[in-house]
Image (cartoon, rainbow, N blue to C red):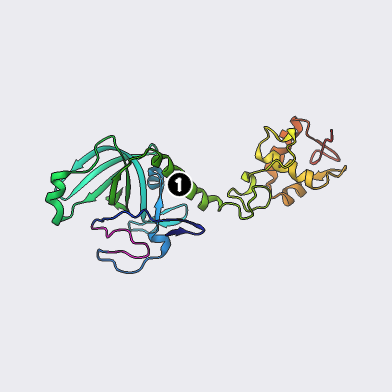
Amino acid sequence: MSGYGGYSTTSYGAAGGDNDGGFMWGSQGGGSQSAVKPINDESLRPVTIKQIIDAEPAYAGEASFRIDGLDVKQVTIVGQVRAIMQQTTNITYRIDDGTGTIEVKQWLDADKQDAASDSGPSFREEDYVRVWGRLKSFNSKRHVGAHVIKPVRDFNEVNYHLLEATYVHLFFTRGGPPQDGGMGMGGGGMAGGDDSMFVDDGNDARYRGYSQKAKKMFDYLSRSGNPTEGIHMQVISREASMTIQDVMTAAEELLSHGTIYTTMDDETFAILER
């Protein structure tokens, strides 16, 4: 299993490796480095090529990168082969996944070099492949040192990979899925703050077509008992975990639909009962 906080996924079980040492989590199976690495360093992470291009260097002078604030070294990508350049010691593939392009280098085993040159790769240009490898940089140019490259047999794998990469990105930037099974105001949802999901418990027609901010404010006013004197925006901001700007935006939307009205002043609101 590879793990990132609460997110985990089973290993892909690919066999093989290059002189980068394979991808055994928590350690390096070969090469000159033998020290055990932290699990977050060596866990296999599904990414898009754009994430690789935008990754921040983790340490000066080292081929180490950070994506979403975590060190990332082992990655898997899925994309289309745009070019194949075979050399004496390695084969370089140019891979495009729709978010960007990157070079993938697969070093040839000297003992198996003759066999590899006879058979060549099991895929051609324009084919889709999945790559497992190590994120590297040479002369300030990033590439993936491939451990394994396999052709994609089912195009659903392309869509699955993009969804998985998106899920992992959202996990680290917005938090994990709800723990209480709900998606309402419990605070356990994947999204935080004004992006939290909302359940229309009452199936009220006034909920339909509203933004998440407006729904969140309306829901708070409903649960507060909707006092006739209204509730000030500062209280709404504090109790509903919304910024003042979000409360103002939500209030504008609800006022334009005639769902709420101002009471004591222009910053105090109550639901217009119908």
Using residue 137 as the reference point, say whether residue 3 is left or right of it. right
Q: Who is closer to the viewer here, 186 or 94?
A: 186
CA neighbours of label 1 inside 10 A, class few (<14), some (14 to 19), many (20+): some
Q: Is residue 130 left or right of residue 223?
A: left
Left or right for 93, reference 215: left
- The residue most toward the right is 228
Decide: is 188 above or below 200. below
Q: Which residue is mark 1?
A: 164
Give whichever of 222, 128 is nearer the camera. Answer: 128
Please state which of residues 37 and 25 is positioned toward the viewer in this rendering.
Answer: 25
Q: Quadrant of the N terminus?
A: bottom left
| Magenta region, residue range | 19-29
Q: Is residue 57 visible?
A: no
Instruction: Tell me, yes or no, whether the highlighted magenta stretch contains residue 221.
Output: no
Q: Is residue 227 visible?
A: yes
The residue at the point 38 percent across, 60 percent down is 42
Q: Is residue 135 above or below residue 267?
A: below
**Image location (x, y in percent) of residue 100:** 37, 39
Q: Residue 176, how many percent across, how many down?
A: 55, 53
For this rendering, which residue is in front, 181 or 147? 181
Residue 76: give x, y in percent of width and height. Answer: 36, 49
**In which image quadrant can residue 153 be found?**
top left
Q: Secondary structure at mark 1?
A: helix
Q: Main secondary structure of the magenta part?
A: loop
- The amino acid pointed to by label 1 is Glu
In the image, what residue occupies the spot 28% across and 46% down?
Answer: 104
User: Total label count?
Assistant: 1
Quarter occupied by residue 207: top right
Residue 269 image position (x, y, % from top left): 80, 40
Q: Quadrant of residue 19?
A: bottom left
What residue sits 78% from the left and 44% below the top? 221
